[in-house]
Amino acid sequence: AVILPFISEAKASALIRNLLDVGLDHDALTYARRLSIENPDADFARAIELQTLYELGRADEATVLAKELKELPSSGPLAMYWAARVLLKWGADHEDVVQTVDRAVQLGTPSSKVKGIIAKSEARIGRTAAHAGQFAEAVNWLRRSLDTEADINVLSDLIDCLLEANEADAAVTTARTCLANHSFDKLRPDVLVQLGKALRYSLKLEEAKAVLEQAATYPLVKQAPEAILADTLELLGEADEAIRFLTGRATTAEGCRRVATPLYYLNLLRGRMAE
């Protein structure tokens, strides 16, 4: 196919997306590379080549091109945006990612579009520290990530790290702060679960029960509250209430996954009561 000397970013991106969607990976990459060759002065052309490599998971080629574009003075905001995404995905140093994002912003990329890249890089460092048992370091980086962008998975990891570090009160304070933060408004049910978890481990059991019961009233919660609420009820000496709650959740749940969770904890609880 003949490629025009110039084609708009939107049309090129749509064509690449269509080719990838129907499984024509080779054609997509061939087109992206020809586009880059025939439009050497168009920032979006190199960016789309990089985006295509990213979408195809071709880590080595994408990383080489990202580093090349990062060093080119002529690279524009779109190229820098995709370079940052590639460097984040395939393990570049945090400072490398930050420098690339900063340059993308300086060149005109809206900061709202790239802040998630920084947040994910910070969260990755925090999770690596947590896996190594370095919970103070993990807490520092996970907090930085949350300050950059609201993310319920990062909050969950942060709460877990604080609990592992025997800082249950700090976990409670963190969850309460997020609950009051408007950036978490759409994640309120999940933040309630995290607050309930922190309260349970700080032995504020009555409040934990109330918070988790509130979380359980929402239809869609990413981290189901069943286990923590049942555990809290059992600690309060309300094992029968826990069984009723889990049985009700299993009865009214929609879909196999939502049924399996309460049934699993129901069977565990019944087994403990039978001992």
Image (tube, rainbow, N blue to C red):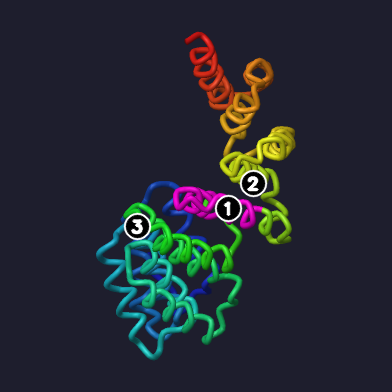
Of callouts 1 and 3, the N-terminal one? 3
Question: Between residues 99 and 31, which one lies in front from this camera angle?
Answer: 99
The answer for how far apart the CA atoms under marks 2 and 3 are is 49 Å
Disc number lying in front (1 or 3): 1
The answer for how far apart the CA atoms under marks 1 and 3 are is 51 Å
The 10 Å Cα crowd at callout 2, few under 14, some 14 to 19, many 20 or more, is: many
Q: Secondary structure at mark 2?
A: helix
The answer for how far apart the CA atoms under marks 2 and 1 are is 8 Å
Q: Residue furthest bottom?
A: 73
- Residue 122's x, y, as percent? 45, 66
- Where is mark 3, residue-wise? 27
Span highlighted in magenta in the image: 154-175
Queried whether the magenta region covers residue 174, the answer comes back as yes
- Where is mark 2, residue-wise? 195
- Where is mark 1, residue-wise? 171
In the picture, residue 219 is in which quadrant? top right
Of callouts 2 and 3, the N-terminal one? 3
Of callouts 2 and 1, the N-terminal one? 1
- Residue 49's x, y, as percent? 37, 69
Question: Between residues 155 and 50, which one lies in front from this camera angle?
Answer: 155
In the picture, residue 73 is in which quadrant? bottom left
Look at label 1 and name its amino acid: Ala
Magenta: main secondary structure: helix
